[in-house]
Amino acid sequence: MREIVLDTETTGLDALRGDRLVEIGCVELVNHMPTGQVYHRYLNPERDMPQEAFAVHGLSTEFLADKPLFSAVAEEFLAFIGDDTPLIIHNASFDIGFINAELGRLARAPVARERLVDTLLLARRKHPGVSNRLDDLCSRYAIDNSKRTKHGALLDAELLAEVYIDLIGARQSSLILAEARQTGSRIMIDVGRRMREVPLAPRVFDEDRAAHDAFIASLGDKAIWREFTDDAE
């Protein structure tokens, strides 16, 4: 099952009163695991950046001046999120409101709200009566958010993907905690690591292998590493 975790940054809080998108970040999940495929764009909002918004995400009018308009990236964005792929968003009505406002300016159909999975609502059901901001959830689930000194759409989408996996209990498929009722002790059962259905693209290229082989050759004929080279096999 494919899902897209999505986050945005904006010039303000009201898409109907002139505030605009300035950043979109998306992370692809397949069977609740990140595939390594992401979508990320900064956008020129065609207006100034209020100081209040700049304090949140640090994206200035000058930085965004040469970035594309939403109209220039709309097709690639819609292609990435697909027609019916579920969209995982924290406080979904806010982000989708801005996305649909931008699509409306282009006379494009809005993203259907039936596609939305709002992690804020999920968190409120699972943890009622406490704060469920993204930072709070990261702390609750021991997810490292130390790089989040300011809001950023892609970083926040990556963190939210981790939070979502914990919220729905998908991480328990690789580790089960069972209670031994008769003794009151807790037993940890390792059921093996989950494997990606579609492996990530290789990060070691031919030139890297050639450089490694050259290094092994420089160690001499008796180097133990020669037992592990392709030639030895």
Image (cartoon, grey):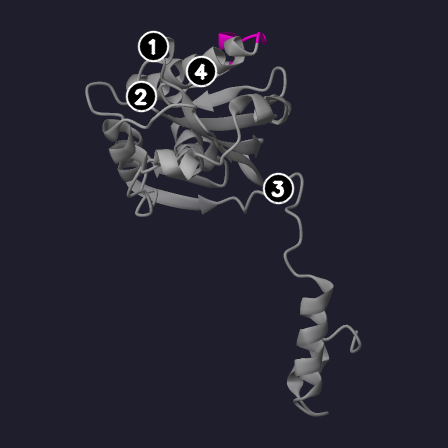
Q: Which residue is mark 4?
A: 96
Looking at the rendered structure, the kind of residue marked 2 is: Gly
**Vertical order, 121 against 228 (above or below):** above
Q: Please report contact status of discs 1 and 2: CB closer than 8 Å, yes or no.
A: yes
Q: Please report contact status of discs 1 and 4: CB closer than 8 Å, yes or no.
A: no
Q: Quadrant of residue 29?
A: top right
Residues drawn in magenta: 107-115
Tell me the distance, in whole angstroms, between the alpha carbons under discs 1 and 4.
15 Å
Please give left or right for residue 108 compared with residue 216 in the image.
left
Looking at the rendered structure, the kind of residue marked 1 is: Arg
Residue 80: horizontal and vertical position, in percent?
61, 27
Q: Please report contact status of discs 1 and 3: CB closer than 8 Å, yes or no.
A: no
Residue 133: horizontal and vertical position, in percent?
27, 27
Residue 184: horizontal and vertical position, in percent?
27, 39
Mark 2 or 3 closer to N-term? 2
Which secondary structure type mostly characterizes the magenta part of the structure? loop
Q: Which residue is mark 3?
A: 196
Q: Which residue is mark 1?
A: 17
Callout 2: helix, strand or loop? loop
Tell me the distance, in whole angstroms, between the alpha carbons under discs 1 and 3.
44 Å
Q: Please report contact status of discs 4 and 2: CB closer than 8 Å, yes or no.
A: no
Mark 4 or 3 closer to N-term? 4
Label drawn at residue 12: 2
Q: Residue at x 31, y 38 (%)?
A: 58
Instruction: Using a 10 Å C-alpha cutoff, classify the residue at mark 2 as few (fewer than 14 neighbours), some (14 to 19) or many (20 or more).
Output: some
